[in-house]
Image: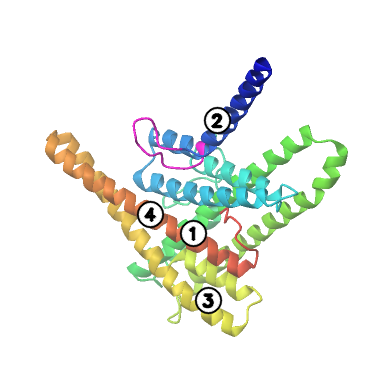
Amino acid sequence: MKLKCFVVAVCYSVCVMAGKYSREVNEQKPGGDGLTVEFRIGKLNQVWEKAKRMPLSPVRQAELHSDLKIQEKDELQWKKLKAEGLDETGEKEAQLRRNFNVILAKYGMDGKRDTRSVENNSLKDHDAKEGDIFDDPRLDKLWNKAKSSGKFSNEELSSLKKEFQHHRDKIHEYNILIDAVSRTEEIHKNVISPLEGDAKEPELHKKHTDLKQKMRDLNHGFERLRKLSHEGFTEDSEFREPRVIELWEAAKRANLSEDELDSLKEELHHFETKVEKHSHYQEQLELSHQKLQHVEALGDKEHIRKTQEKYNTLAEKTREIGYKMKKHMQDLSSKISGQGLNHNEL
């Protein structure tokens, strides 16, 4: 009897420890030294720790932190859905895995040398010319034409350049997403049976439909840039920030009533203020980093300590504002598309 009780107790202890271990791997707790970890999900914490050892610029690092926070929110939300049996097909889980792969690739952390240049249907081996700054022949041609047209003031050229840069980044991230989807499909082909493959067909169709929609959005974005480059800005332009303009253009193409559009326009004005605040903090963070490097070169320990503290505070504030801005953008994108709280992969 004693032996039987002992065996039961051992088995129970092993099960408890196994469950505890699996939870602790994925839901991080404060470390042994009392320091709290950055993320509640283990793999995200590992990515963040690795990123801090990489030569990422302060702004780029802050952007990664915001993306990881969004990923964390989505993954924790998905865990609740799964516990309630609301992801029976596994599509949301697959989407989260895809989003995570996109983040890794976006910041050069997927172990691959990034050869995904910004591409389109134009010849990729075009000769680089002075003034080519967007790694894309169509964008460079438009930009150089706009810059030499005399239609834009310095302030308008600065705004236009931001739109070009945003479009370039969108193309780059779209290429990363295609790569991530292709790799996921290749893995599925190698591991699933023919019957499972038939069951997955609707999911694959949805992924490709989403990709086509994103490509249509890119085409709309390019057409806007082409129109701007030829005609210049109009006095009644609603917004200044590229991300806000993109959302507004998408909203006008969506099936929204006049009242819904008016309400959304007001919300987008608030969002634009948030985007501008985030951009300001990014600029200040970059300047603070340059000052810190200068102070470190001088070698005054007390001065270094104070400057480091100011830099750390600014970096934390930039990450916080970046997360709120991206979360707000995610909510607005979902509202416009009517697809619920899906992760905004681009």
First-in-chain label (3 vs 2): 2
* Identity, as a three-letter code, of the amino acid under mark 1: Lys
Q: Which residue: 63% across, 42% down?
A: 180
| Residue 250 inside the magenta-drawn segment | no
Q: Mark number for residue 21?
A: 2
The residue mark sitting in front, 1 or 3, is 1
Taking the view exactly as shown, the residue that stands out farthest to the front is 1
Q: Check disc 4: other Cα within 10 Å, few if <14, some if 14-19, many if 20+.
A: some
From where the camera sits, is residue 120 visible?
Answer: no
Residues under numbered marks 1 and 4 in contact, where contact means CB atoms less than 8 Å apart: no
Residues under numbered marks 3 and 4 in contact, where contact means CB atoms less than 8 Å apart: no
Residues under numbered marks 1 and 3 in contact, where contact means CB atoms less than 8 Å apart: no
First-in-chain label (4 vs 2): 2
Residue under pointer 1: 327
User: Which percent across, then down, holds residue 192?
Assistant: 80, 36
Is 46 on the left or on the right of 62, as rendered?
A: right
Residue under pointer 3: 264
Q: Marks 4/2: CA distance?
A: 30 Å
* Identity, as a three-letter code, of the amino acid under mark 3: Leu
Asked whether 3 or 214 is in front, the reply is 3
Q: Marks 3/4: CA distance?
A: 24 Å
Q: Mark number for residue 320?
A: 4
Q: Check disc 1: other Cα within 10 Å, few if <14, some if 14-19, many if 20+.
A: some
Q: Which residues are magenta?
A: 29-42
The residue mark sitting in front, 2 or 1, is 2
Query: Above or below — where is 241 with respect to 313?
Result: below
From where the camera sits, is residue 75 visible?
Answer: yes
* Identity, as a three-letter code, of the amino acid under mark 2: Tyr
Q: Which residue: 56% across, 28% down?
A: 17
Q: Marks 2/1: CA distance?
A: 31 Å
Query: Which secondary structure, mark 2?
Result: helix
